[in-house]
Image (tube, grey):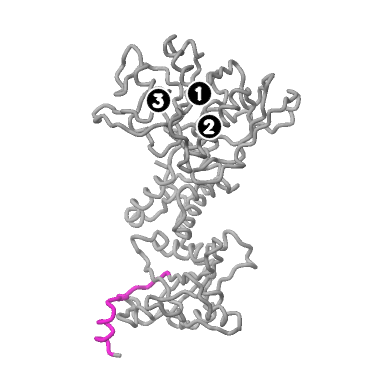
């Protein structure tokens, strides 16, 4: 086929490129073999690394990553165009056993665009310096990505073949940590690379699913839990609570399940909670475990309203502001519709147009003041009219001080939207002897409200930063978006 005919079929061009990242996204149950991929590359023209990766989900297939460096006679780099470029690294599948033949003849075998069964493995081709792929930023990131299995597997379990010493090359290419402008430590860098890999390997995963995996990862969950937040930090563990608080949290958890499934009862007002107690008693940390919420601390903030949150949380809201944040003699007017769980509420802020939003959600109000000190008589009467639960802890601390009618209230893991929450909360109403508390593993600093708790470095930094000025500039937006996605503003 002539060059002109090839160009008419495809305009794909490889124009003097030296380094490539290939991904064969499916090994077709073993029909795409690593030795057949290796046959594509002449040792006199290419340095190569070929690695086989295990599928990350039940439905995912094993796949291959390939790093290529052109060392041929053309000093400018490798050049090809048309079909010669587009299909140059296609690999025929090998059906060398009856199992594969039977699989190929079944309806589950994938089809190509022409609705024919695939018999050739075709790679995704990226070049060094690709602006939309952070793994192609430079030679180090490309080799590091292709050989990433070295970080999670013993060397004897690696499935990597190469015709050069890639480990020595990684040492030479690794950015100089002394000269790097990044203040990120090694743990944070590995954590962010792990998040990056999760995003690229599980492109259909939701943010909630990624966060759930972070919290279940014993190596990295402390970095996420202790990152600076604009909301109180939830802590999963044992709480000692009075029975009336236990009853309300059971109610709130049930409400959350119904709300997440869009099955909350129509016509019944959600019930509010007023929870008071001394500082650092664990009030906010406990409530933060109960699902997603809109959060206001001290003053009203229009931007804190979240339409997809399951309840409204007012924390130390002891000021006197109206719905625009202006100082007034009493803020009962703005508080009343939230406490009553009214179906719709009008919100606004300074320089904001008033907006009516759907509400119909429970309200949790946490304060250091007693119920009588916080609200006047007519407001207290309204709280009771709407079926509020009033709990005053006094000097008790929820993490280690038992009540006479105590309950051991254990939260095993985060409550996330669309998850099954049937076994999330385990409550036990049996009486407990206070001496049993000595057997609990309690962290005395568990409820200290310090947002930098457990961080190795108090200064905020960019975990993606590597000593490459041009690459940092090029990928600044990509890094910022990924970090913002997971709450690192």
- Give the label on residue 252, or none: 2
Q: Which residues are magenta?
A: 2-21
Q: Is residue 186 magenta?
A: no
Which residue carries the number 3 mark?
338
Nearest the eye: 351 or 248: 248
- Give the label on residue 273, or none: 1
Nearest the eye: 457 or 207: 207
> Going from the N terminus, do you reach mark 2 or mark 3 first?
2
> Going from the N terminus, do you reach mark 1 or mark 2 first?
2
Position above or below: 258 against 136: above
Horizontal side of residue 256 vs 4, given as left or right = right
Quarter of the image where one finds residue 117:
bottom left
> Going from the N terminus, do you reach mark 1 or mark 3 first?
1
Q: Secondary structure at mark 2?
A: helix
Horizontal side of residue 474 vs 190, given as left or right = left
Seen as rendered, the residue at the extreme bottom is: 1
Position above or below: 196 against 489: below
Horizontal side of residue 397 vs 470, given as left or right = right
Q: CA distance from mark 1 to mark 3?
A: 11 Å
Image quarter of the C terminus: top left
């Amino acid at each position: 086929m002539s060059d002109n005919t090839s160009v008419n079929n495809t305009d794909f061009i490889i124009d003097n490129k030296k380094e490539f990242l290939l991904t064969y996204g499916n090994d077709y149950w073993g029909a795409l073999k690593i030795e057949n991929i290796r046959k594509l590359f002449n040792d006199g023209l290419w340095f190569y690394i070929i690695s086989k990766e295990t599928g990350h989900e039940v439905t995912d297939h094993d796949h291959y990553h390939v790093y290529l460096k052109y060392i041929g006679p053309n000093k400018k780099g490798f050049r090809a165009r048309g079909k010669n470029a587009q299909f140059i690294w296609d690999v025929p599948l090998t059906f060398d056993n009856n199992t594969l033949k039977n699989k190929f003849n079944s309806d589950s075998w994938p089809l190509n665009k022409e609705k024919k069964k695939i018999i050739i493995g075709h790679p995704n081709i990226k070049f060094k310096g690709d602006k939309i792929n952070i793994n192609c930023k430079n030679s180090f990131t490309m080799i590091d990505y292709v050989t990433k299995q070295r970080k999670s597997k013993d060397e004897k379990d690696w499935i990597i073949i190469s015709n050069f010493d890639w480990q020595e090359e990684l040492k030479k290419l690794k950015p100089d940590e002394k000269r790097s402008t990044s203040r990120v430590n090694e743990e944070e860098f590995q954590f962010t690379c792990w998040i990056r890999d999760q995003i690229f390997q599980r492109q259909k995963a939701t943010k909630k699913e990624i966060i759930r995996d972070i919290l279940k990862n014993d190596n990295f969950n402390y970095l996420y839990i202790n990152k600076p937040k604009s909301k109180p930090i939830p802590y999963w563990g044992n709480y000692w609570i009075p029975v009336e608080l236990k009853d309300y949290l059971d109610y709130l958890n049930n409400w959350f399940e119904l709300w997440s499934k869009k099955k909350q009862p129509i016509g019944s007002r959600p019930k509010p909670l007023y929870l008071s107690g001394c500082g650092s008693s664990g009030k906010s940390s406990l409530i933060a475990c109960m699902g997603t919420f809109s959060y206001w601390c001290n003053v009203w903030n229009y931007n804190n309203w979240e339409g997809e949150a399951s309840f409204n949380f007012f924390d130390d809201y002891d000021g006197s502001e109206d719905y625009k944040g202006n100082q007034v003699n009493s803020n009962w007017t703005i508080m009343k519709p939230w406490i009553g769980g009214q179906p719709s509420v009008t919100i606004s802020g300074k320089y904001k147009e008033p907006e009516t939003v759907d509400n119909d959600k429970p309200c949790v109000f946490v304060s250091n003041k007693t119920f009588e000190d916080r609200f006047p008589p007519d407001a207290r009467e309204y709280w009771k009219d709407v079926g509020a639960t009033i709990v005053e802890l006094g000097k008790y601390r929820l993490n280690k001080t038992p009540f006479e009618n105590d309950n051991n209230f254990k939260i095993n893991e985060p409550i996330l939207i669309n998850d099954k929450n049937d076994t999330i909360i385990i409550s036990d109403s049996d009486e407990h002897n206070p001496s049993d508390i000595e057997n609990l593993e309690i962290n005395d600093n568990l409820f200290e409200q310090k947002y930098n708790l457990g961080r190795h470095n108090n200064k905020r930094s960019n975990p993606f930063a590597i000593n490459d000025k041009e690459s940092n500039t090029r990928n600044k937006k990509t890094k910022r978006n990924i970090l913002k996605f997971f709450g690192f503003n």
